[in-house]
Image (cartoon, rainbow, N blue to C red):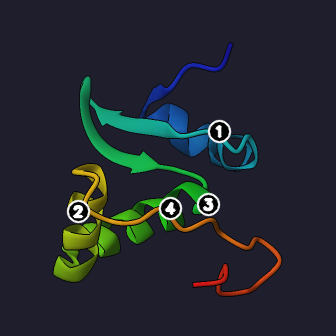
Amino acid sequence: MIKSTYNIKEAQANLPKLCRSGKRFIIANRDNPVAVALPIEDFEALMETMDVLADPVAMQALEAARKGETAFVPLDLNDENFGL
């Protein structure tokens, strides 16, 4: 099992291996977390989620769907716009 928190010296010594592992890890200074490293796919997903959460129109649509106020529309996964 790969641990997930490394002190700065450990992280420096193992950075290539840690990056190739494709896992998230934390870098700590004297047991205090100071940095997080994560795979680019995780970072992109996080940024996309933040974009959606910051968009008032998207949030209104999500809230309406959550309340059952919108009609169900089946998605066409073969269409680049999903048939919307």
Marks 4 and 2 sit apart, C-alpha to C-alpha, by 23 Å
Along the viewing direction, whichever of 80 and 71 lies nearer the viewer: 71
Along the viewing direction, whichever of 81 and 33 lies nearer the viewer: 81
Q: Earlier in the sequence, mark 3 or mark 2?
A: 3
Q: Which mark is residue 45?
A: 4
Q: Amino acid at mark 4?
A: Ala
Q: Is residue 69 left or right of residue 72?
A: left
Q: Residue at x 76, y 71 (%)?
A: 77
Pointers 3 and 2 in contact (CB under 8 A)? Answer: no
Marks 3 and 2 sit apart, C-alpha to C-alpha, by 29 Å
The residue beneath circle 2 is: 64
Task: Name the element at disc 1.
Answer: helix
The residue beneath circle 1 is: 14
Q: Earlier in the sequence, mark 4 or mark 1?
A: 1
Marks 3 and 1 sit apart, C-alpha to C-alpha, by 21 Å
Q: Earlier in the sequence, mark 1 or mark 2?
A: 1
* 3 up-or-down from 27: above or below: above
Pointers 4 and 2 in contact (CB under 8 A)? Answer: no
The residue beneath circle 3 is: 41
Q: Amino acid at mark 1?
A: Asn
Q: Earlier in the sequence, mark 4 or mark 2?
A: 4
Along the viewing direction, whichever of 67 and 28 lies nearer the viewer: 67
Q: Position of residue 60 (x, y in %)?
A: 19, 71
Q: Position of residue 36 (x, y in %)?
A: 39, 47
